[in-house]
Amino acid sequence: MDQKIGVKYIFKLNEMEPENNSRRGFLLTGLAVAGLVAGCTQKKDPFEAGAEEQAMASGKTVKLLSVDGEVIEVDEAFLKPVPHMPPVSNTEARVGIPGKKFVMVIDLSRCKNLKICQAACDHAHELSPGQNWIKVRPMQDAEHTAPYWQPTLCMHCDEPPCVKVCPVDATFKRQDGIVLIDHDRCIGCRFCMAACPYSTRVFNWGEPEISTEIASEPYTPESPFPQKKGTVGKCDFCADMTRRGELPHCVTACPNNVYLFGDMNEDSVSNGSETFRFSDLIRDRGGYRLMEDLGTKPSVYYLPPVNRNFPFESGLENDKLQNS
Amino acid sequence: MENSISIADDEKIIQDLLPGKFNTTGKVWVGILTAISLVGVYAYYRQLRYGLIVTNMRDYVSWGIYISNFVFFVAISLVGSLITAVFRLAGVKWGTPLTRIAEMIAVAAIIFASIIIIVDMGSPERFYNLFIHPRIQSPIMWDVIVITTYFFISILLLYYPLLPDIKILLRFKEKSGPALYKFYSFLGSFWKGSHKQYLLSKKAINVLCITIIPVAFTIHTVTSWLFATTYRPGWDSTNFGAYFIAGAFLVGAGGVVVAMYIFRKCNSLEKYITLDHFDKMGRVLVLLALLYLYFNVNEFLTPFFKMKESEAGYLKDLLSGSFAPMFWFAVLTGIILPIIVLLFKKGRRPLPMFIVGIMVVVGAWFKRYLIVTPTLLHPFLPMHDVPKAYHYYFPSWEEWAISMGSLAGAMLIITLLSRIFPIIPIQETLTEHHHETAAQNI
Ligand code: SF4
Ligand code: SF4
């Protein structure tokens, strides 16, 4: 079993201890596995009763799809129902989680364009082909400077131009720093796409390809399901995961620990295996944000691509695969 | 004796100006326009059913010819205020026969501007959200407010000056037929033409003329702000409002010239829309074209000189890259050639003016296309790892059908209005005629 899909917790939520253990169903199977792995590898777990720890292998295995799209086989006895989360009301989803201020740090020196983050995100959010909330771009700042891979996603700007221009408040900024879209309200004018300087927004041009189970999920702006035709989508910092106190899918999926996620108020960010003090990391490694001059105040920080773990070329073949 | 001559004159003028039934050409014209509009309606049905996927817009070019068309319609609608209000307030008398044409164009254009913006929406069934969850800091909201205002003022500016004419129209029951007669009585039977009513209407028209100018400036400025309030290279310009207004007056005046020529030919109005009118409109047009040229130099020369990194790709593409043929075509046909032609007296005769008018309008349409698409194809962060289709934009047949349908629909409205109402204000022509004869008799 691969360590990398284990889910670690970076902060605890005192206000929410889900009791109800009814199974949420197929759609969260990926999460079930992730939760299971976490259960196996980590003793202290805020959300688990501990019953699973005594489970004995039954010998019957099932095939499951992991968050990063790999098919894995798991013993039935280890399957654990995903805690049922009551759907968050629209008002709650618009307010956010009190006292939090989410930030992400992306370490450019570790990225080799594996695109596992992208695949995990696409899979977890049921994105239609061609729609990517995470885009990994080859960047070169000047002719004689070194090229590097730069993952981009919604920057969850503190002065978000997309929110400013939305005529119906369908895209909004929460007090925990996350910028979300209410797909039930969006009129599809795409002004936010024109306004976002980071080109992170995607549009559901046609009917999204989703299974009926997912289509019947209760909708909240916080959980990404189901996508709706004629509305805009973008990275949501996995607001449903963060409410449960879990890391976003891209963070846990990346085998190179490129992503770190955390809470600015606690001043800590984690990639699942290590936790850092956010301010130290940014100061010591020279963290910066993209297009600072625009005044959008992104919540995503980059660590410069110095002392790189991989040569730039090591990611090129992934682009070829993707585009063929 | 003199009086009877003048009455005969009056009858002649009225007979000349009464709207007549369509002849064969007219019917064919209406038929063609209807057919094009219906194809557009069918394409829109497909778009509603399958979503915007039927267009060729994708995540990068997320606004396409619908928005270009919207800007075009807003631009051309500005002519109503130019001819009616600016001329009126400036005391330009020769513009009178052109006011109704201008107002008809304005009303038709503003109607289709609102329609096309709804067509562009991904979820038009949620249109009402604009009214129950409005957010006033969004430029779209400003646009909704100002377009609605402009629409009502334009309708009123068409309607009030019509009232005296409707009184005349009501005299010719047999000519108009029962249905139109009923319609006319519904619109204007309360109008007795008394001195009190006349003063009231005059006052109302004056108030409207004064209010429509700021509203007209606002509507197009706000439309320019839809772009200018974003960070995008090519849109991030403080010049945009003025640049849009100048362009709008130009295309509007061009549209009036085209309409003047066609109505004059089809309804034999040579006596009312004279060579002098063409000459003067030519002068107005050349002035507006020079103004627009000036703003174009401002818009492109300064960023071209600096060639900032974020703007460079966009500018190169526009001036010498894949958009260059269209760009230079739009600048040449829409601005430069009209200026050259119209500077000559011979160029201000009806036929050359008609051709120039068409050039201006066509050039302006392409100019609007160039405002939207090239910018979207040059985002700040390079396009990478997206499907091939995202790198280009050429409208799908549905987009063409809907856009052409909307243009045809606007022309259809103008044509139908000209069938129902006199194209040249009858009462005003009569009054002016009386003044003239009175002046001659003294
Ligand atoms: S990155 Fe773009 S979509 Fe995300 S908050 Fe900023 S402006 Fe909005
Ligand atoms: S597309 Fe939707 S989210 Fe974006 S600005 Fe329009 S209504 Fe708001």
Image: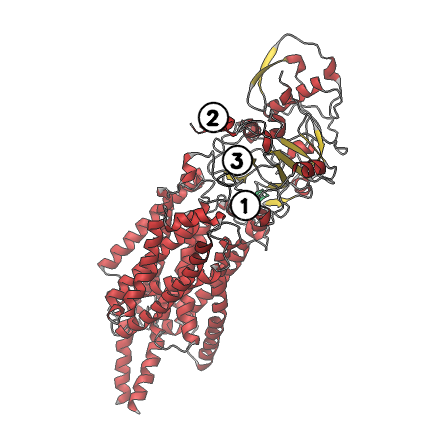
In this image, A100 relative to B44: left or right? right
What's under tag 3, amino acid-wise?
Ala
Earlier residue among tags 2 and 1:
1
Q: Earlier in the sequence, mark 1 or mark 3?
A: 3
Instruction: Name the secondary structure under disc 2.
Output: helix
Do circles 2 and 1 both sit on a common chain?
yes
Which residue is tagged 3? Answer: A146
Residue A114 in picture, x, y percent from top left:
54, 26
Quarter holding residue A14: top right
Q: Chain of mark 3?
A: A
Q: Percent position (x, y) of residue B236?
A: 50, 53
Mark 1 and mark 2 in contact (Cβ < 8 Å)? no
Disc 1 versus disc 3: nearer the observer: 3
Residue B431's place in the image compared with A262, above or below, is below
- Percent across and percent down for residue A199 are 52, 42
Distance in Å between CA atoms under marks 2 and 1: 29 Å
Q: Please name the residue shown 44% across and 52% down the image.
A: B115
What residue lies at 50% left-to-right and 67% top-to-bottom?
A: B214
> From the Cβ of disc 3, is ligand 1 less than 8 Å away?
no
Q: Residue furthest left?
A: B24
Look at label 1 and name its amino acid. Cys
Q: Which chain is indicated by disc 2?
A: A
Residue at numbered disc 2 = A317
Note whether ligand 1 is within 8 Å of mark 1: yes
Q: Nearer the viewer, residue A256 or A165?
A: A256
Residue linked to disc 1: A196
Q: Secondary structure at mark 3?
A: loop
Q: Is residue B314 visible?
A: yes
Which residue appears farthest toward the front when viewing the image? A144
Q: Nearer the viewer, mark 3 or mark 2?
A: 3
Point out residue B160 in the picture as x, y percentages from the top left corner.
43, 71
